[in-house]
Image (cartoon, grey):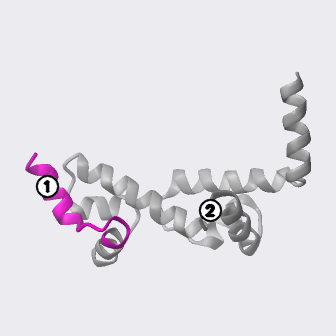
């Protein structure tokens, strides 16, 4: 009982607009569920009924990343799983929502420090 009351007081004190936090959480879930679709900040903000500028600011405040950065991280994370399960680089690219293999490869290398094709071949050799 004491714990619940303390949490409620702290929440009210630090997060006056809890409905805004709920929208940011919904935006993250929307990204996580639809990462393989073409997504833009406009699409995400429309899905949770909030201004894209406000969403960008609040998402960064809550998660430390912008929605676009989270989307990239989610896609690369899922691509790593596909490559680990013996999928091809092009399968990984198109399965996670990229339309260009060169864009995917460049981003994969930037975010992981490794070439996607080499990651796949290293896994195949194990």
Name the foreground residue: 106 vs 36.
106
- What is the tally of numbered marks visible in this picture? 2
Q: Is mark 2 on a helix, strand or loop?
A: loop
Callout 2 environment at 10 Å: few (<14), some (14 to 19), or many (20+)?
few
- Asked if residue 119 can be seen in this view, the reply is yes
Quadrant of the rendered image containing residue 30? bottom right
Name the foreground residue: 64 vs 116.
64
Residue 25 percent coordinates (x, y): 68, 51
Residue 113 percent coordinates (x, y): 30, 68
> Residue furthest toward the top?
1
Q: Which residue is drawn at 62% across and 71% down?
A: 41
Check residue 64 in the rendering and tell me which mark sits there, or answer none.
2
Q: Is residue 61 left or right of residue 100?
A: right
- Asked if residue 36 can be seen in this view, the reply is no
Callout 1 environment at 10 Å: few (<14), some (14 to 19), or many (20+)?
few
Rounded to the nearest angstrom, the CA distance separating label 1 from label 2 is 32 Å
Residue 102 belongs to the span the image colors magenta: no
Sequence-wise, which precedes: disc 1 or disc 2?
2
Q: What stretch is highlighted in magenta?
A: 109-126
- In the rendered image, which residue does mark 1 sit on? 122
Q: Which residue is drawn at 35% across and 58% down?
A: 95
């Amino acid at each position: 009982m004491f714990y619940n009351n303390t949490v409620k007081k702290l929440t009210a004190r630090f997060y006056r607009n809890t409905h805004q936090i709920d929208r940011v959480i919904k935006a993250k879930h929307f990204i996580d569920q639809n990462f393989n679709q073409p997504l833009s900040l406009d699409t995400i903000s429309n899905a949770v009924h909030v201004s894209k500028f406000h969403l960008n600011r609040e998402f960064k405040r809550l998660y430390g990343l912008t929605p676009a950065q989270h989307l990239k991280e989610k896609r690369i994370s899922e691509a790593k799983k596909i490559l680990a399960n013996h999928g091809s680089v092009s399968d990984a690219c198109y399965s996670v929502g990229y339309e260009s293999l060169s864009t995917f490869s460049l981003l994969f290398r930037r975010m992981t420090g490794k070439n996607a094709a080499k990651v796949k071949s290293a896994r195949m050799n194990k």
